[in-house]
Image (cartoon, helix red, strand yellow):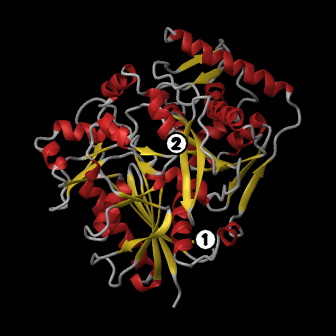
């Protein structure tokens, strides 16, 4: 009987399920969007029960589409939107509040207070993170302080906290397993990534009872078996990783210094830095890449807030294109940007600047500037921001980058990928399977259950679809980099820095 791996990719706007075969090829996909809730400006929530029902339904749909059942599934791997926070009642299994999504900013004031109270260095040295409302710790605290009766129940040991992976495992095992993996734990601001344990000092700072927290496991091991009626037979759940960590593994960035960049609404770049925790000196986050076979690997991470979203803005805000796919054709209508630079800081600047006050800025326009120039400058801004993060990674790690592995929607744009290679002066590689997040989760689950014998075996499955080599002439590129740096300074000056 043919065996497959089922990857569950629980994202911010949709839940997906993908069935992979032994060659790492996609055999079936099902996807379902769910509601985004915005109760107040800056607040973003999801209904945890809708997250569960959408994920359960696509898991069933993906297998039914193939005409297979649970006995054909060797294992389930889970990858998830990170930092999103769910607190539920251990007895009833019901959430006490909606999931507070990673994008939610309601705890920004509390985070400012933590900084003012002098906790930045403590949190940085233990977690590798900067204090920000992005991470889970302040969200848990908010639920305890704002949901009537929640704190008393938590202190009585009656509440459970989990990121989305924990919630799904709890639901699939019908409350038998309350666990997470090291990658998701490393995004909470409560987990010491040096000792690999929940940190008592941090729990005191956030005033969160330890009894709420899940057991922290490796990214590839047997966590439990499904106990729901979705599948007729029990299936091992054997792989868990946050989405960006799963993508790093799916890209087979298994060696020290290997880097992947996911081009989505924003960009997430991760660099494997090996077995040693290194604190960034250049405003990057240090996070856990994964833990497999008792070995923990670390990564640097840089987040760019606006990447593909700048193309959506050209479409919806400016109206110069009708579909996102048209941007490449419009950008190719001119030979260069005509001296125009676009800093798309619609939501501030992410790494390595971490500057929330900066706003979007276009500089260098003349009477001769056309929609083509603006489109080209917008595309180039994605590559320039990626360069800024990569240079910070090189500085922190002391490792020069020889190649960048890429995935995500914007990688279909050859003009952007070629410009990226030119800017970085290194090879940019687009793999055959760009669903690297789900693929990473599948690999982790397959490794734990013997579906694949080793990481080496998996590495041989990874295939290149196209390579972009850097252009030899550096003079124009160097001139462009200088112009970009001036444009960023202009944007910062406008925000009053």
**Image point 72% across, 51% down: which residue?**
429
Secondary structure of the residue carrying tag 2 is: loop
Q: Which residue is mark 1?
A: 24
Q: Earlier in the sequence, mark 2 or mark 1?
A: 1
At x 26%, y 52%, the residue is: 212
Label 2 vs label 1, nearer the camera:
1
The answer to whether 465 is drawn above or below residue 3 in the figure is above
The quarter of the picture where residue 43 lies is top left
Nearest to the observer: residue 228 or residue 212: 212
Q: Is residue 190 above or below residue 47?
A: above
Picture mark count: 2
Number of the label disc, if any, that sits on residue 323:
2
Q: Nearer the viewer, residue 330 or 383?
A: 383
> Above or below — where is 300 with respect to 437?
above
Residue neighbourhood size for the residue with mark 1, other residues' Cα within 10 Å, grouped as few (<14), some (14–19), many (≥20): many
Please indicate whether residue 482 sits to the left or right of residue 14 in the image.
right
* Label 2, label 1: how far apart the Cα atoms are: 31 Å
Residue 134 visible in the snapshot:
yes
Q: Residue furthest bottom?
A: 1
Q: Secondary structure at mark 1?
A: loop
Q: Position of residue 373 (x, y in %)?
A: 66, 25
């Amino acid at each position: 009987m043919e065996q497959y791996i089922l990857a569950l990719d629980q994202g911010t706007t949709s839940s997906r399920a993908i069935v992979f075969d032994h060659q790492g090829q996609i055999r079936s996909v099902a996807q379902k969007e769910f509601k985004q809730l915005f109760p107040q400006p800056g607040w973003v929530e999801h209904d945890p029960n809708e997250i569960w029902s959408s994920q359960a339904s696509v898991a069933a749909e993906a297998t039914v589409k193939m005409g297979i059942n649970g006995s054909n599934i060797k294992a389930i791997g889970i990858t998830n939107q990170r930092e999103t926070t769910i607190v539920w009642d251990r007895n009833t299994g019901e959430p006490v509040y909606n999931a507070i999504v990673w994008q939610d900013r309601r705890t920004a004031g509390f985070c400012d207070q933590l900084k003012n109270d002098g906790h930045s260095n403590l949190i940085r040295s233990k977690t590798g993170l900067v204090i920000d409302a992005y991470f889970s710790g302040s969200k848990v605290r908010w639920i305890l302080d704002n949901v009537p009766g929640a704190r008393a129940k938590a202190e009585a040991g009656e509440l459970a906290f989990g990121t989305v992976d924990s919630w799904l495992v709890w639901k699939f095992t019908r409350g038998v397993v309350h666990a997470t993996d090291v990658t998701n734990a490393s995004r909470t601001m409560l987990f010491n990534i040096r000792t690999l344990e929940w940190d008592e000092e941090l729990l005191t700072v956030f005033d969160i009872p330890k009894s709420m927290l899940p057991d922290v496991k490796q990214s590839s091991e047997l966590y439990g078996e499904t106990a729901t009626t979705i599948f007729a037979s029990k299936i091992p759940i054997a792989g868990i990783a946050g989405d960006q960590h799963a993508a790093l593994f799916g890209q087979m960035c298994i060696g020290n210094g290997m880097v992947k960049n996911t081009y989505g609404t924003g960009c997430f770049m991760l660099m494997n830095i090996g077995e040693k925790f290194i604190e960034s000196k250049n405003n990057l986050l240090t996070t856990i890449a994964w833990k497999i076979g008792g070995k923990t690997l670390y990564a640097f991470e840089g987040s760019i807030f606006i990447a593909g979203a700048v193309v959506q803005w050209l479409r919806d805000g400016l109206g110069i294109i009708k579909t996102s796919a048209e941007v490449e054709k419009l950008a190719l209508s001119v030979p260069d940007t005509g001296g125009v630079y676009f800093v798309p800081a619609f939501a501030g600047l992410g790494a390595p600047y971490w500057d929330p006050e900066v706003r979007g800025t276009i500089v260098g326009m003349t009477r001769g500037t056309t929609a083509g120039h603006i489109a080209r400058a917008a595309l180039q801004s994605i590559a320039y921001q990626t360069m800024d993060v990569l240079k910070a990674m090189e500085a922190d790690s002391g490792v020069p980058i020889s190649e960048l592995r890429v995935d995500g929607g914007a990688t279909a744009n050859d003009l952007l990928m070629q410009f990226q290679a030119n800017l970085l002066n290194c090879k940019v590689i687009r793999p055959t399977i760009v669903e690297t997040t789900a693929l990473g989760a599948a690999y982790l689950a397959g490794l734990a259950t013997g579906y694949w014998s080793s990481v080496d075996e998996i590495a041989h499955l990874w295939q290149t679809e196209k390579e972009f080599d850097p252009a030899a002439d550096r003079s124009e590129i160097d001139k462009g980099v200088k112009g970009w740096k001036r444009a960023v300074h202009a944007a910062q000056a406008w925000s009053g820095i």
